[in-house]
Amino acid sequence: MLNEKDTNELVDFIKNIPSKIEIIDNIIDEKLFYRDYIDTAEELIKPLKAIGKVYEFAKKQRFKEFLKSISKEINENDFIDSNNVNKLKEYVSKDNNVDFIVNTIDYSINSRSIKCSSLLGFYAGNILNKYKDIDYKDFQIIEILKNIDDIELNIFKEFVDKTLNFDKEYYVPFEILNTHKEEEIVLMFNKFETYQMVSRPNHLTIRDINGEPSMIKVSYIGKNLIELLNKTKI
């Protein structure tokens, strides 16, 4: 459990997320800097310094997209006002809720794509709006968004769009198998299963022992991820 000082700092962070999305770029550029040894060690060669600047820029861009998304979610419903501060303090008094907020902020900076950073912001903002206590599914969703890239996200959505009915098991559609390298699709669906986005009988690959596509079903975690994609249209 957070002490009073840490609780107040976390509440202040959430309260101070700008309500005007257009000013977030300036706030990040003026007040947030990723300082590490690359900035201070004069002996480092210039190419390494250049890499450091690119790395810093990429992290800033991801955090900007996260803040813009979470701002859109929590500010459209007047989430932060004088009546809500005590409620927010009570909310962050629970360890699971704090872990979720802190992890989501960290994951947004270290995700594998700007799109996933933005999705993390929408997801966290929606949860904060409802003061929803965090459950296993929520932690799993943010783990997915930290660790998958745009190509994997697109393939997963393509699979769901071509199968449609969540209550049934499906073959990986031939349209997917025939338009992408099968070895890559195998690896992607293995990853989807690792993150519990899909389930497969007997943990088969995307083709069974006879060379035919095997059955795959979208999990309830995968359903929630697709609902987030459809809602945000990212």
Image: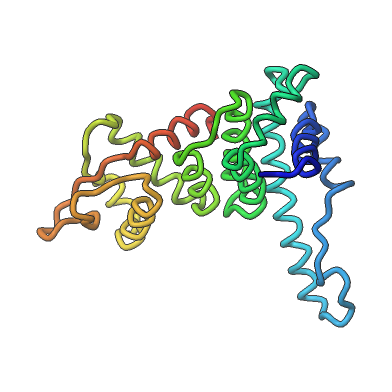
Count of numbered circles in the view: 0
* Identity of the residue drawn at 19% across and 49% down: 201
Report x, y in % for residue 191.
38, 56
Q: How is the image coloured?
A: rainbow
- The residue closer to the viewer here, 190 or 12, is 12
Q: In the image, is residue 51 above or below residue 65? A: below
Q: In the image, is residue 122 above or below residue 85? A: below
Side of 191 where 211 appears, left or right: left
Side of 155 where 38 appears, left or right: right
* Identity of the residue drawn at 75% across and 56% down: 57
Where's the N terminus, which quadrant?
top right
Where's the C terminus, which quadrant?
top right
Q: In the image, is residue 4 above or below residue 190? A: above
The part of the image, by quadrant, that contains residue 13 is top right
* Identity of the residue drawn at 58% across and 30% down: 127
The residue positioned farthest toward the left in the image shown: 210
Side of 8 where 103 appears, left or right: left
Report x, y in % for residue 104.
62, 45
- The residue closer to the viewer here, 82 or 172, is 82
- The residue closer to the viewer here, 142 or 52, is 142
Report x, y in % for residue 112.
57, 54
The part of the image, by quadrant, that contains residue 2 is top right
- The residue closer to the viewer here, 222 or 159, is 222
* Identity of the residue drawn at 24% across and 49% down: 200
